[in-house]
DNA sequence: GTCTATATATGGATAGAC
DNA sequence: GTCTATCCATATATAGAC
């Protein structure tokens, strides 16, 4: 298993497989991406893939693990923090957008859930559901406290999740500004939700403090 | 070609193929959906598909044509209408969401663009780009007139497009309310954009008049 | 308009050498 | 850790009967 001492540098080839696979999977879909294509992109022969991963599904599994586990962990950290719902939601949108933009993997694929249709990947579909539920929870508590306008919390959650899913597409664009866009996106959505939009600046600074908490641990893959 | 007299009732089997194919394509992706599966869902043998469509790609082509052509046509109608940018954007979000919810086809697939990766489907990718550009145009003109807050128009457009793409996913949910949600979604986004949120009700009624215009023609497929 | 039979290609994964 | 050769399953599409 060549366990690394310093937490980084897992294998080299293995990481390159994940990166190239994420791009191909996002572009051509799960069954549309062949192991030959992945191998060619990495620069090894097709059977060599199976030294690093037991099968094609295992590659996707690892990608979703690296993408979703930190996302849910970060959101859980936000939930339990001491802050107003608006600040939590602001930090969620800003933090998630930043995380997506900084990720070495191209996770556009997860927008469509196509790869997740495999029954073996059901646990990850469950993680997405959990993420959506927690987002919903923040919105509802904001509505109950009066900080958010009344309205269907489900719809507001779809708006947030829809934007975050879209953020995975930003990797394709040269228009994205890593520095300002995550915060601007959060402000745009919060303005739509806040009962009193003039409180946006308070929310923003409260969220800035919270964001320190939104630094998910990098999980150690068991494979 | 058995040209229909009354505009409806194209073929029967052909329509059923499109409906079942849209579901399967959205669930399993383009290359993940086999012609055998589609045929089985329709209740015919696999080779019988090729009587109605020359090949698998032609099915996807027709689906995207039926989905995207009305969408762009409706948006173009809105653009040339006499109304404020905010009213146009409101009508766009409400109208598009309604159209998506009413569509007989499950177009979740187009969220990921996966099927569109085929070079032969490039024209439809172009249509999506056009739709996004027109949306961007409305937002920019609203910012220039001062009706919308300053901010990156690209980001605001991504928010709108992200939500509309997400709306394709609503077919999976039993939480969606066809009547109220399209309008509520439009209001939520507009509140985030308007310089003066108190004008939302004026915008809403201006949009209601516009929506009559947002009734795209059903295109006659050439195939 | 739908069927059975089948040609032909391509994909995931293994065996075993180096 | 990577290679070549190869097995076996599955996919699209065609041929031709009914």
Image (tube, coloured by chain):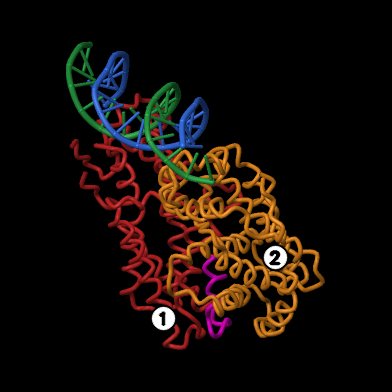
Chain colours: A orange, B red, C blue, D green
Look at the numbered disc 1 and give the secondary structure of its residue.
Answer: helix
Instruction: Decide: few, some or many residues near mark 1? Use Cα within 10 Å; few <14, some 14-19, many ≥20.
Output: many
Residue A123 makes an appearance in the image: yes
Q: What chain is tagged by disc 2?
A: A
Q: Taken as a whole, is the magenta stretch helix, strand or loop?
A: helix
**Residue ID for mark 1:** B140
Judge from the rendering whether residue A24 lies leftward or rightward of residue B199; answer left or right: left
Residue A195 badge: none
Q: Is residue A100 above or below residue D5?
A: below
Judge from the rendering whether residue B73 lies leftward or rightward of residue B28; answer left or right: left
Residue B213 makes an appearance in the image: no
Quadrant of residue A190 within the rendered picture: bottom right
Q: How many marks?
A: 2
Instruction: Decide: few, some or many residues near mark 2? Use Cα within 10 Å; few <14, some 14-19, many ≥20.
Output: many
Determine the CA span between mark 2 and mark 1. 29 Å
B86 is within the stretch colored magenta = no
B161 vs B2, nearest the viewer: B161
A98 vs B49, nearest the viewer: A98
**Residue ID for mark 2:** A139
């Amino acid at each position: 298993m060549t366990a690394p001492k310093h937490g980084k540098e897992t294998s080299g080839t293995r990481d390159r497989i994940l990166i190239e696979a994420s791009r191909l999977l996002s572009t051509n879909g799960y069954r549309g991406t062949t192991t030959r294509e992945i191998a060619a992109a990495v620069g090894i022969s097709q059977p060599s893939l199976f030294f690093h991963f037991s099968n094609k599904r295992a590659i996707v599994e690892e990608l979703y693990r690296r993408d979703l586990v930190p996302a849910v962990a970060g959101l859980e950290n936000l939930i339990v923090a001491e802050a107003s719902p608006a600040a939590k939601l602001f930090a969620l949108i800003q933090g998630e957008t930043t995380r997506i933009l900084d990720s070495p993997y191209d996770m556009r694929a997860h927008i469509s859930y196509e790869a997740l249709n495999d029954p073996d990947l059901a646990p990850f579909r469950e993680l997405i559901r959990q993420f959506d539920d927690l987002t919903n929870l923040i919105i509802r508590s904001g509505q109950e406290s009066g900080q958010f306008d009344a309205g269907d919390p489900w719809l507001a959650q779809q708006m947030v999740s829809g934007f975050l899913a879209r953020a995975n597409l930003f990797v394709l664009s040269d228009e994205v500004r890593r520095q300002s866009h995550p915060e601007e996106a959060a402000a745009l959505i919060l303005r739509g939700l806040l009962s009193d939009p003039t409180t946006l600046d308070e929310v923003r600074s409260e969220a800035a403090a919270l964001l320190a908490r939104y630094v998910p641990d990098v999980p150690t893959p068991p494979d």
